[in-house]
Amino acid sequence: MLFKNLFFSHCNLFSAGGKAIVFSLALAFFGNSRSFGAFFLFIALAFYFYLRPFFEAKKYFFSFLIFLIAALLTISRLPAESVKWNFVVAAVFGLAFFAFLGIKNLIFIHRASVYEFLNNFVFFLVFIIFFMADKSSGWIFWGYTSAVLSFFLLFRESIISRPGRDINLFSASLAALVSQFVLAVSYLPVGFLNSAAISLAAVLVLKDLTVSHLRGDLNRQVILKNATIILLFSVIVFIASKWQP
């Protein structure tokens, strides 16, 4: 009964599951070998599985592309000798890849909820990579520019189906706000995971405010609710953090 409530087709479910397993193995192989051949194999398999069938491939393409880049950057930061951790991380990304296939190929019934989770997950990955990166002078321009572009594309893809106009303007404004927020958070000595969590909370609040505005029901109560959420979440993170010099 649970599977009937979650999935349309069991055949497509098993097919997507098999592709996700191959995706995970290819990513783990790249993490262990760090060779160009493994990189090319992973990219070729990922795009082949995602683009076939081509149905709705363009709708989620940018979040999928950012997800792929994040997967490669994340696995590259692990030591090549850490075979166990390479497989664990690859398995996590494989589950996310399965979710991408599920929403694109109409396997899931509640696709909107799964997509929102995926969109937030990719945001979280971008934040982790941003806060873990070495903030050298050469990184500042390219890394920060890439992060801002990722924010814009993820916001745009998330709200493009909402009613309203000026989606690009809203997305650019939200990306600018988040980019300034993460710059401020990067100076806090709370660790990269806590910094990423605070930034994700800010994204969730901005999404809720934007959707309420586009629906025309943004009011003082909604603003106060979201302000309270971000404040309480930040306090919890600060209390739980081991402050690092």
Image: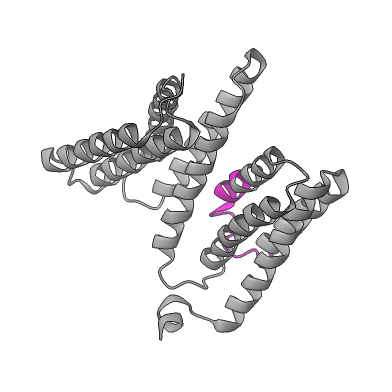
On screen, residue 11 versus residue 170, left or right, reads right
The reply to whether the magenta stretch includes residue 58 is yes
Which quadrant of the figure has residue 220?
top left
Between 142 and 52, the residue placed more toward the observer is 142
Figure quadrant of the N terminus? bottom left
- Residue at the top extreme of this rendering: 137
The reply to whether the magenta stretch includes residue 214 is no
- Residue at the front extreme of this rendering: 242
Residue 197, x across and y down, in percent: 41, 39
Residue 83, x across and y down, in percent: 74, 52
Q: Is residue 244 visible?
A: yes
- Residue at the left extreme of this rendering: 220
Between 13 and 190, the residue placed more toward the observer is 190
Magenta region, main secondary structure? loop
Q: Is residue 48 visible?
A: no
Q: How many labels does the image show?
A: 0
At horizontal 62% and vertical 23% (from top left) the residue drawn is: 134
At horizontal 54% and vertical 53% (from top left) the residue drawn is: 60
User: Magenta residues, as a range?
Assistant: 52-66
Residue 4, x across and y down, in percent: 44, 83
Residue 226, x across and y down, in percent: 22, 40
| Colour style of the rendered protein structure | one colour
At horizontal 33% and vertical 31% (from top left) the residue drawn is: 238
At horizontal 38% and vertical 33% (from top left) the residue drawn is: 241
- Residue at the bottom extreme of this rendering: 1
Which quadrant of the figure has residue 66?
top right
Between 62 and 162, the residue placed more toward the observer is 62
Relative to 147, does residue 19 appear above or below in the rendering? below
On screen, residue 42 versus residue 156, left or right, reads right
